[in-house]
């Protein structure tokens, strides 16, 4: 069934892949983005131009959410240096504005709310395997802001409003708005431009990674699943 979907942050690293992916699956996709990174920041051409509203998510109003079946919420301040520079910005956007967005969506009759969360909220885990039940232990304002948003939004869940939280690993892969500050993209960029892979640590660390197209497929799967299967759950 075709859904009318609003993707926040549709012009970002993940959004510029995910929004066209949802459109290819037959959904009516629209976006909202601050466009901090305009078209002139593109690494490659957009596959398709998604109709979008140029607006900070902190400034969204109820009418901006009217008529949508689902919201895919990607918009965030999403790296640790920025989060540490002004933590209050991170909490204002990643937590307070996200919760307000969910409240507006619920009031507007949006049934599905899919939020891009993060594995970083688990911090430095020594467990052999981290699952949805592993205790969270954030090390940064970014990770803490995501936990607080998840906790507050989950309280809005009822039979009319179904939130789902996808805790992505570190994303990699080509996107029109490419990021090369994230680990695998950074290693590939060093290898391509200098012929050497530059590692700024002992090289013993590991972290979960996921391709940007797999993130897109995961959001589609959650959005398409029966509501009772994914209702108010973390993945």
Image (tube, rainbow, N blue to C red):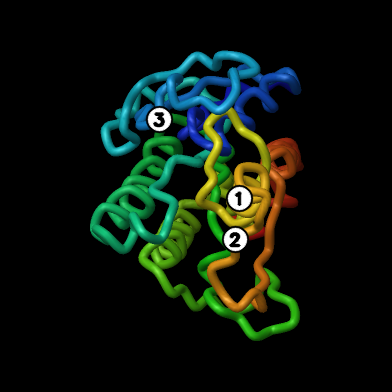
Gap in angstroms between the C-alphas marked 1 and 3: 22 Å
Residue 94: percent from left, percent from top: 38, 51
Q: Earlier in the sequence, mark 1 or mark 2?
A: 1
Gap between marks 3 and 2 measured at Cα: 26 Å
| Number of on-image labels | 3
Q: Name the residue under label 1.
A: 190
**Residue 150 at what x, y percent from top left?**
48, 59
Query: How far is the residue under mark 1 from the one under mark 2?
Result: 6 Å
Q: Residues within 10 Å of mark 1 (few under 14, many from 20)?
A: some
96 on left or right of 70 = left
Q: Which of marks 1 and 3 is nearer the N terminus?
A: 3
Identify which residue is drawn at 60% across, 78% down: 202
**Which residue lies at the image location 65% right of the left edge and 58% below the top edge?**
197
Please tell me whether residue 151 is drawn above or below residue 62 in the rendered image.
below
Q: Which of 166 and 184 is in front in this view?
A: 184
Residue 185, horizontal then vertical, whole percent: 62, 48
Say which residue label 3 marks: 37
Q: Is mark 3 on a helix, strand or loop?
A: loop
Q: Name the residue: 73% across, 20% down.
A: 24
Q: Which residue in the structure is indicated by mark 2?
A: 198
Apparent side of residue 99 relative to residue 7 in the rendered image (left or right): left
Q: Residue at x 45, y 39 (%)?
A: 106
């Amino acid at each position: 069934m075709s859904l009318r979907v609003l993707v926040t942050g549709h012009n970002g690293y993940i959004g510029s892949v995910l929004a066209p992916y949802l459109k290819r699956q037959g959904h009516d996709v629209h976006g909202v983005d601050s466009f901090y990174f305009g078209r002139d920041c593109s690494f490659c051409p957009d596959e398709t131009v998604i109709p979008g509203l140029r607006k900070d998510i902190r400034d969204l109003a109820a009418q901006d959410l009217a008529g949508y079946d689902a919201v895919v919420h990607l918009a965030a301040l999403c790296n640790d240096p920025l989060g540490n520079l002004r933590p209050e910005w991170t909490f204002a956007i990643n937590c307070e504005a996200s919760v307000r967005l969910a409240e507006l969506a619920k009031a507007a009759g949006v049934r599905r709310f899919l939020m891009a969360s993060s594995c970083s909220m688990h911090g430095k885990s020594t467990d052999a395997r981290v699952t949805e039940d592993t205790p969270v232990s954030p090390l940064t304002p970014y990770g803490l802001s995501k936990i607080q948003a998840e906790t507050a939004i989950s309280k809005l869940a009822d039979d009319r409003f179904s939130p789902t939280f996808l805790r992505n690993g570190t994303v990699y892969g080509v996107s029109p708005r490419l990021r090369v500050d994230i680990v695998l993209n950074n290693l590939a960029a060093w290898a391509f431009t200098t012929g050497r892979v530059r590692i700024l640590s002992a090289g013993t660390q590991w972290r979960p990674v996921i391709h940007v197209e797999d993130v897109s497929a995961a959001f589609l799967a959650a959005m398409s699943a029966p509501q009772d299967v994914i209702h108010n759950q973390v993945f």
